[in-house]
Image (cartoon, rainbow, N blue to C red):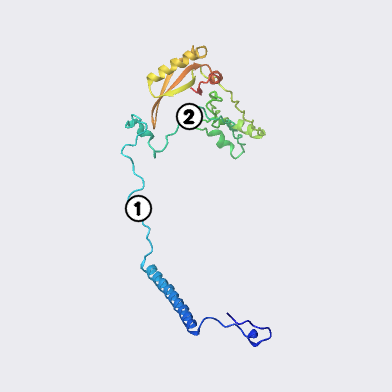
């Protein structure tokens, strides 16, 4: 039984003693030191091992696949399209230059140029010194005094009438000396202005104008297509006859279906307009 401590005594103020002996304290501190050293050694060994493993392993190399990614199947399947080996399809093979398409519609009309009229030069004025020489010389062949320049017209707008033959100017006989003196006294007459020739459009010849309805690759198809178009438009084409015009182009021969004859261009244009309202292609063909 412990001795009771009395308030105010020496034992009351003394600090309580620890129950661990000095030897036990030495062992405790020694164990703590050994554990710390062991832990540091384990950490050091793990660190060195990780460095060696990282140095030994090489970086991965990514290489492309040696085999093709896509392969054509032996049996592709799908739709089997016949007649792919025909030579006629060679004309439309890829890589070739596209052939020009035949133009059925006429080009836009352009205004005709005005005719050029050339005025004849005035008659030369004779003088006393030149009178005998001019009166005795006669040109070998007389030329017309008025020259009409070339007149350009479009094919479908107007046609020039052929100009009437001009009268041949003959040289007068040499006058007597007395007549020459009297003529030299008279004043020279002013030259007359040349007359301009009027351009009159000539009517087109009957039976020259036609209309083109289509272009096919053979004569037989041209006749059958003409029969079909004529049957569908018998009220317009019943009195016209068929004319097949063959042309050779780069992509082959074509046969143009033309109907006619028509009286003039206006009749052909009017017929084409009525056919186009019914859905039939048409163009005017000049004679």
Which residue in the rendered view is the most extreme toward the bottom? 10
Q: CA distance from mark 2 to mark 1?
A: 56 Å
User: Mark 2–mark 1 contact, CB under 8 Å?
Assistant: no
Residue 240 in view of the camera: no
Where residue 130 appears, as percent x and y from the top left, is 58, 39
Where residue 232 appears, as percent x and y from the top left, is 49, 14
Viewer-proximal residue among 273 and 71? 71
Point 36% across, 32% down: residue:
89
Point 46% across, 20% down: residue:
258
Point 66% across, 86% down: residue:
9
Residue topped by disc 1: 65
Q: SS of the residue at dot 1?
A: loop
User: Could you tell me which quadrant the N terminus lies in?
Assistant: bottom right
Q: Quadrant of residue 125?
A: top right
Where residue 195 appears, as percent x and y from the top left, is 62, 28
Viewer-proximal residue among 99 and 93? 93
Viewer-proximal residue among 236 and 168? 236
Say if 19 sits above or below 116 in the image: below
Where residue 92 appears, as percent x and y from the top left, is 39, 34
Q: Earlier in the sequence, mark 2 or mark 1?
A: 1
Within 10 angstroms of label 2, few (less than 14), some, or many (20 or more) residues? few
Residue topped by disc 2: 103
Viewer-proximal residue among 157 and 200? 157
Q: SS of the residue at dot 2?
A: loop
């Amino acid at each position: 039984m412990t001795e009771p401590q009395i308030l105010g005594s020496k034992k009351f103020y003394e600090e309580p003693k620890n129950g661990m002996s000095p030897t036990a304290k030495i062992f405790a501190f020694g164990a703590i030191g050994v554990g710390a050293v062991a832990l540091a050694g384990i950490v050091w060994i793990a660190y060195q091992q990780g460095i060696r493993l990282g140095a030994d392993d090489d970086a991965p190399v990514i290489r492309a696949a040696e085999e093709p990614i896509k392969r054509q199947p032996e049996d592709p399947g799908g739709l089997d399209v016949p007649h792919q080996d025909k030579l006629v399809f060679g004309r439309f093979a890829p890589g070739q230059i596209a052939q020009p398409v035949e133009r059925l519609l006429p080009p836009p009309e352009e205004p005709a140029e005005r005719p050029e009229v050339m005025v004849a030069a005035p008659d030369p004025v004779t003088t006393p010194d030149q009178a005998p020489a001019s009166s005795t010389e006669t040109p070998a062949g007389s030329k017309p005094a008025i020259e009409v320049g070339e007149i350009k017209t479009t094919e479908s707008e107007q046609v020039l009438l052929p100009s009437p033959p001009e009268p041949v100017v003959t040289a007068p006989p040499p006058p007597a000396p007395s007549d020459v003196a009297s003529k030299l006294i008279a004043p020279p007459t002013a030259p007359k202005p040349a007359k301009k020739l009027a351009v009159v459009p000539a009517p087109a010849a009957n039976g020259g104008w036609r209309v083109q309805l289509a272009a096919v690759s053979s004569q037989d198809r041209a006749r059958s297509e003409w029969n079909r178009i004529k049957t569908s438009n018998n009220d317009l084409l019943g009195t016209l006859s068929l004319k097949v015009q063959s042309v050779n182009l780069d992509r082959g021969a074509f046969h143009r279906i033309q109907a006619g004859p028509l009286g003039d261009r206006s009749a052909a244009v009017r017929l084409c307009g009525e056919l186009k309202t019914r859905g039939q292609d048409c163009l005017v063909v000049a004679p």
